Amino acid sequence: MNAIDQLVAGYRRFRRGYYEENRQQLMELAHLGQSPKVAIVACCDSRVDPAVITDSTPGSLFVIRNVANLVPPCEGEGDWHSTSAALEFAVCGLEVEHIIVLGHARCGGIRALLEGQAEGCEDRFIAGWMSLAESARQRALDRTDLNTLDERIYACELDAIRISLSNLETFPWIQKRVAENRLQLHGWYYDMASADLLCLDAEAKGFVPPPDPAGST
Ligand SMILES: [Zn+2]
């Protein structure tokens, strides 16, 4: 079965299974509109699906995906601000209460940033986009305690999350809501090989496993 046939077969299973089992909820979502509490900025990487790894259902996550889950700073130049437009809608339109920047291990975008070019690509667009994380690249290269490329990529992946979090605060409508405690910003890092999740803890000043929520299993 080719890739498209697999998708169509999957759609049919969804229609007969999930859709029928959750028809009422999906109908309500369709008629009443979405009101997700969380926006998540994730990588395009096919192995890091935010809804799958958080076991979330339709309507609960506003997902923004781009290369290397980067958030640009708020800027007026240029016309094609896909990520900024999606953030504006999530924050000002939907009034989400949380924004998560979800980084991940083995990120091709971060690897391209450190290696200079994405494998097999002309790099017409990727290098410019990845320059958002240039200071993370420089810091990873400058660190004398890191020996291998993989160690530098890991450091860069974590640091790029911090850059995106600080860029989020350059948007005045995000800054205002954070100051008013109506919006919280989070940095997460997911390793698809181990399924380990780390969360940026401001007090610990680093990425640590998330605490178990009360009542979880
Ligand atoms: Zn990635």
Image (cartoon, helix red, strand yellow):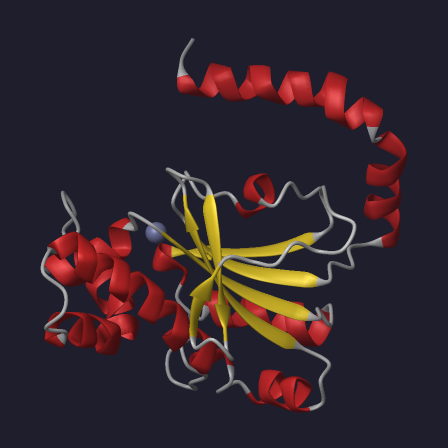
Image spot of residue 201 (x, y percent): 51, 72
187 horizontally vs 104: left or right: right
Work out whether 34 lies above or below 19: below
159 horizontally vs 205: left or right: left
Task: Tell how many labels.
Answer: 0
94 horizontally vs 21: left or right: left
- Tell me which residue sits at (37%, 78%) in the image: 78
Where, quadrant-wise, is the N terminus in this rendering? Answer: top left
- Kindly give the residue lying farthest to the top in the view shown: 1
Residue 125 is at least partly visible in this image? no
Residue 216 is at least partly visible in this image? yes
Quarter of the rendering containing residue 68: bottom left
- Tell me which residue sits at (72%, 51%) in the image: 60
213 horizontally vs 78: left or right: right
Work out whether 112 lies above or below 76: above
Image spot of residue 182 (x, y percent): 73, 81
Q: Which is more toward the observer, 25 or 161?
A: 161
- Tell me which residue sits at (38%, 45%) in the image: 45
Q: Which is more toward the observer, 167 or 207?
A: 207
Quarter of the rendering containing residue 189: bottom left
- Tell me which residue sits at (60%, 45%) in the image: 54
Where, quadrant-wise, is the C terminus in this rendering? Answer: top right
Image spot of residue 110 (x, y percent): 25, 58
Image spot of residue 37 (x, y percent): 73, 62
Q: Which is more toward the observer, 28 or 145?
A: 145
